[in-house]
Amino acid sequence: MAKTMKQPPAYGVTSVDHALQLAVTLQVEGPLTVSEAARRLGVARSSAHRLLSTLVYRDFAVQNEDRSYRAGPVLEIAAKTQSNVAVVRAAALGPLQTLVDALDETATLQIRTGRTVRFIASVECSQTLRVGSREGMVFPAHQVTGGLVMLAALTDEELAALYEPLPADPAEERPDLPQLRGELRSVRHSGVALNLERSERGVVAVGRGVTGPEGDTVAAVSVAMPSVRYTPHRMTEIVRSLTIATEAISARL
C-alpha cells in the first residue's frame, strides 16, 4: 500500500518547526540570508530574522560579515555533508530546469542518508495539473524513485547491513528484503527506476542516478507527473531526457 510522507504532529508549534527547518537547511545546504529564509518558510522577513537570531543565540547558527547566516558550532559536525550536498545541488539546478523545459513535468533531486531520502531541490513544471515541490521532504528510501536508484548502487551485503538491524523507531516500516532485492536487480539492469504510485497515490515518477567523480552514486534525479498523464509510450523520451540531465550534473561535479 502506498505510504505518504511523515505527518506533522497534531499540536505542533509552528515557530519550533520553522526553526528546525532553518537549522536543517543551514546544516545540509549552507549559508542563508534573511530574505532567503523568509521565502523558504513563507514568513515575513522580521519573523525569519527572529528565528535566525535565536539559532545564533543557541549556537546553531553564526552570522557572517555579509549578514548571511551559516551553521554554527552545534551543527559543525555536519560540515563535510553540508559541503557535498551544496555542491551537488548547485550542479543540478541548471540541468533540472532544462529537464523540466524538455518534458514539462516536475523534476527533483534527492540524496540518501541511511534508510531515508531527502529531496534537496525541486523544479515545478508550468502545467496546471502537476506534482508540486517536494523540496525539504523526507521519505523512506525504499518507497521513492530516487531511493530505489540509490539503493540499487549497494551490494546485497550493504543492503542487508542497512535493513537487517532493528530500526530505532518501532513505527518505521521495514521493506520485504527479498522483494526489495528483486526490484533493485531490475533497476540495476535498466539503470532507471519506475514508481507507479508507490509512494503517493496519483503520482508516477521515473528516476536515474547521478554519479560522482569516483563513479559512486551520490544522488538521484526523478521526473514526477500525475498518473493520468503517464503512458509507457513516454518512457523513451523521459529516460533520454533524464540521461542528459544526470550526465550533465555528473560532469559538473
Image (spheres, rainbow, N blue to C red):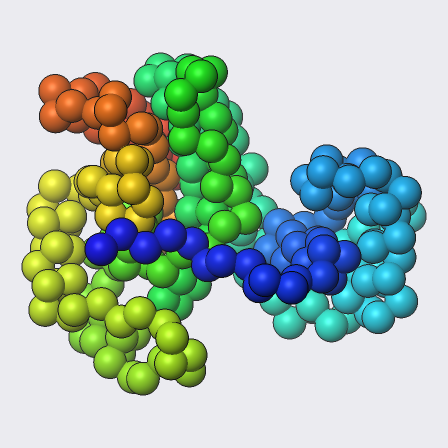
Q: Residue at x 30, y 49 (%)?
A: 199
108 to 12, vertically: above or below: above
Residue at 38% from the left image edge and 17% from the top image edge = 104
User: 243 or 222, which lies in front?
Assistant: 222
**Image x and y of residue 95, in percent:** 44, 26
Q: Is 171 placed above or below 248 here?
A: below
Does the image show residue 150? no
User: Which of the 4 image quarters holds residue 162?
Assistant: bottom left
| Image position of 113 with respect to 111: above or below | below
Residue 179: % across, % down: 10, 63
Q: Quadrant of residue 240?
A: top left
What residue is rendered at 89% in x and 57% in y? 53
Point out the residue furthest to the front here. Answer: 10
Image coordinates for residue 170, horizontal then vertical, percent: 38, 81
- Residue 5 image-quadrant placement: bottom left
The reply to whether residue 176 is in sight is yes
Residue 127 placement, left or right of 22: left
Q: Is residue 8 left or right of residue 6?
A: right
Locate residue 38 relative to residue 175 in the image: left or right: right
Name the residue rendered at 85%, 46% in the picture: 47
- Quadrant occupied by the N terminus: bottom left
Q: Is residue 155 left or right of residue 58?
A: left
Q: How many marks?
A: 0
The location of residue 113, given as percent across then percent down, is: 43, 63
Residue 162 vs 246, above or below: the answer is below
| 224 or 151: nearer the viewer | 224
